[in-house]
Image: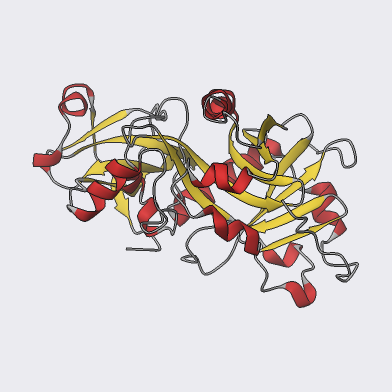
Amino acid sequence: MAALGLTGRPAGLIHKGVSTEAPELAYLSVLRFAGPEAIAFLQGQVSNDTRRLADGVPLLAAYSSAQGRVLAVLHLLPHSSGVMAILPHEIALPTLERLRKFVLRAKVKIEDLSDQYAVAGVRDASALDLGQAAGMAYLERDGVAVARVADGARTATPRYWVVRRREADPATRDGAAEQERAWRLADIRAGMPQVYAATSEQFVAQMLNLDLLDAISFTKGCYTGQEIIARTQHLGRIKRRLSRLRLPAGSWSIGQSLRFADGRTGRLTELAQVGVGAEALAVLSLDATAAGEADTAAGELVSAEELPLPYR
């Protein structure tokens, strides 16, 4: 893969304070796909058109099972050393091991670089000195990569990933817990789906609204799980969708089943504490007739407030 760095760009392109002071999002890991066939390999594995990476465009994509169930949601960055994928630490190793089974003779090497690279998140673009490159989606300089979070361009205020080498730029852990809570809350308010160990292989991509976030290409051709995802889209059989909720005080956990008084059911996919309660994302049935039997039997009756998403 050709280098995609910013040789010749202004020295102040990436603000030094961001690269050295932004707390690490320690719940996230980095996988790297390196080699001349990295993009082609990913093209046959994930839901988005990875050829767009060659144009310096960060992508959101689903990696699914052959049955069309999402195993991981990946943020793909066109790094100069190869395609980098950001995903939760708890599913990084299973995702790596599963993908390696499909390498065969492809000229691609998949590595977990979490011990070499730290991931931080910037919610305020003013912390980045982007200068003339403010409109670019991906920037790289002196071992620091800055990428706009791929959200289908639905949010008015962009957020950015900052990926940096640990040995050259040790990540600070001061304020890391609050940074993680704030980042996950921002994901919730942006309707940005995530999959963790408790929810891996539970949902088809459209249930996570990935079709609404420019994370699925319906024209690129075959990839793992494509048949089920395409059939779901073209037959209009999307009976569950990602929704945003405000939850009262309680013991909530990702993967927890929910049951509403109107008969709808769902499952929590993301959580962030807000005051005594929480805000959350959950995959909910669109009506009572689409409620899953398992959710109906085990779900806890809740009186959650449904909140708007910035899309749909």
The answer to whether residue 162 is visible is yes
Does residue 11 sit above or below 140 in this rendering? below
Foreground of the two, 109 or 271:
109
Q: Quadrant of the C terminus?
A: bottom left
- Give the total of numbered labels: 0
Q: Quadrant of residue 260?
A: top left
The answer to whether residue 184 is visible is no
Residue 289 locus on image (x, y percent): 8, 40
Residue 45 locus on image (x, y percent): 48, 40
Q: Quadrant of residue 41?
A: top right
Q: Identify the image's colour scheme: rainbow, by chain, secondary structure or one colour.
A: secondary structure
Residue at x 56% of width, y 47% of height: 40
Residue 249 locus on image (x, y percent): 39, 34
Residue at x 56% of width, y 28% of height: 104
Does residue 260 sit above or below 54 in this rendering? above
Indicate left or right for 259 with 170 as reference.
left
Residue at x 18% of width, y 48% of height: 237
Determine the residue located farthest toward the bottom in the rendered image: 132
Indicate left or right for 210 with 292 as reference.
right
Indicate left or right for 191 with 301 as reference.
right
Foreground of the two, 221 or 251:
221
Residue 80 locus on image (x, y percent): 76, 51
Does residue 147 sit above or below 22 in this rendering? below
Determine the residue located farthest toward the left in the rendered image: 289
